[in-house]
Image: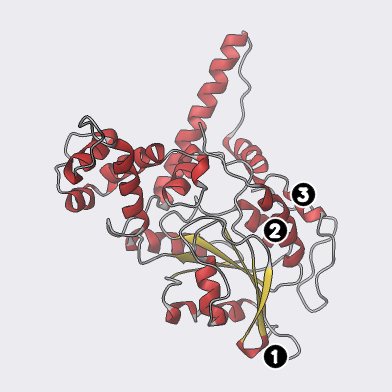
Amino acid sequence: MSIQWFPGHMAAARKKAAEAMAKVDVVIEVVDARLPEASTNPLVHELARFRQRPLLKILNKADFADPAATRAWVEHYNASEGVKAVALSCRKPGEAARIPALCQALAPHRNDLIKPLRMMIMGVPNVGKSTLLNALVRKRVAAVGDEPAITKALTTYDLPERRTIVDTPGLLWPKIDYPADGLMLAASHSIGRNAFADDEAAIFLAGLLLARYPALLAGRFGFPVDGIDAVAVIESIAQRRGYRLKGGAADFEKAAAILLQEYRDGVLGRISLETPQTRAAMIVEAEAALAAKAEKAARRRGAAPKTQDASSQNAENSAGTSGGADDIVAASDEAPASDAPPAPEQEEPPAR
């Protein structure tokens, strides 16, 4: 079953974000460098394209991610029209300080006292938006913590050189289509604790580490990983660390929580949960499973299965994932400021 998490405040916040985007020049999307596409909200891209706003994609926590995977993702995103990608760590003020200049290059027409640059930060929960905002404003104006969805409302702040920036709450989307995306978000703590079980996310993470980073796993916990599965990894952590329940049984839940926390804190090493290649393979596998399920259901009904090419299937999946982007944009029919690029007239936002 796919992990889903869409608290009530997010529905209101996404409509307000759509309205505010009409009055900004550049959208800054913050994603987790360890899972850049899984932590990309499709709504952000739909609204940015609809409003014809350039997108600066910040792959934050790059110091926690596999450098080779991060380079591949930056190259992948920079090949997209209207997108500029950069990898950095918002915890380092010197790196965060580069962002206004990068935004200025994307909106060169907003470069004087009459037309100051206006920016907006968006992204899923717990990817470092508040840390970035505090670095840009140069004081603690946004709460920072190890829990998703701390920020609940849109707020505008003034920056040096008469620039402004709008901070938005962490936004997910109503339906996460791919189960692996939900598990990656859960493992990285971008989803509320009540939406998933630690052991489920930890088993997923352990399996991924076995497949891609076995040396880091063995080096951190000190046990051989050859020939074991994901469940055995967590059991071995419990045994190695001495996590026991009354009666002597291994404390599986505590070991699972430790694995997740040490990954989130970067203690395990520089790890990326996905690359452009592994994501493409995951999508192919997920869509094949979906097609097989549909075919099986059709056979049970005694009817021929409907055939559908991959592109149309993707379009339908994306339409469901966006969670009503048409309605969100319709709620923001206010025209953009006269000195901003005009929004297209009588045009629906494109599907993901």
Asked whether, in this view, residue 248 is left or right of residue 252, the answer is left
3D distance between C-alphas at marks 2 and 1: 26 Å
**Residue 223 picture quarter:** top left
Q: Name the foreground residue: 310 vs 28.
A: 28
Label 3 neighbourhood size at 10 Å, few (<14), some (14-19), many (20+)? some
Q: Mark 1 highlights which residue? A: 112
The first of marks 1 and 3 along the sequence is: 1
Q: Name the foreground residue: 8 vs 346.
A: 8
Label 2 neighbourhood size at 10 Å, few (<14), some (14-19), many (20+)? many
Q: With respect to residue 177, does 83 lie above or below?
A: below
Q: With respect to residue 349, does 282 lie above or below?
A: above
**Hey, which residue is sitting farthest front in the picture?**
246
- Residue displayed at 26% across by 42% down: 210
Image marks 2 and 3: residues in contact by CB distance under 8 Å: no
Q: Mark 3 highlights which residue? A: 326
3D distance between C-alphas at marks 2 and 3: 9 Å
Asked whether, in this view, residue 260 is left or right of residue 121, the answer is left
Q: Give the amino acid at mark 2.
A: Leu
Expressed as whole percent of the image width and height from the top left, the position of residue 285 reads 45, 34
Q: Mark 2 highlights which residue? A: 47
Asked whether, in this view, residue 345 is left or right of residue 97, the answer is right
3D distance between C-alphas at marks 1 and 3: 34 Å
Expressed as whole percent of the image width and height from the top left, the position of residue 194 reads 52, 42
Asked whether, in this view, residue 76 is left or right of residue 43, the answer is left
The first of marks 2 and 1 along the sequence is: 2
Label 1 neighbourhood size at 10 Å, few (<14), some (14-19), many (20+)? few
The first of marks 2 and 3 along the sequence is: 2
Image marks 2 and 1: residues in contact by CB distance under 8 Å: no
Q: Give the amino acid at mark 3.
A: Asp
Q: Name the foreground residue: 269 vs 244.
A: 244
- Residue displayed at 76% across by 52% down: 328
Q: Give the amino acid at mark 1.
A: Asp
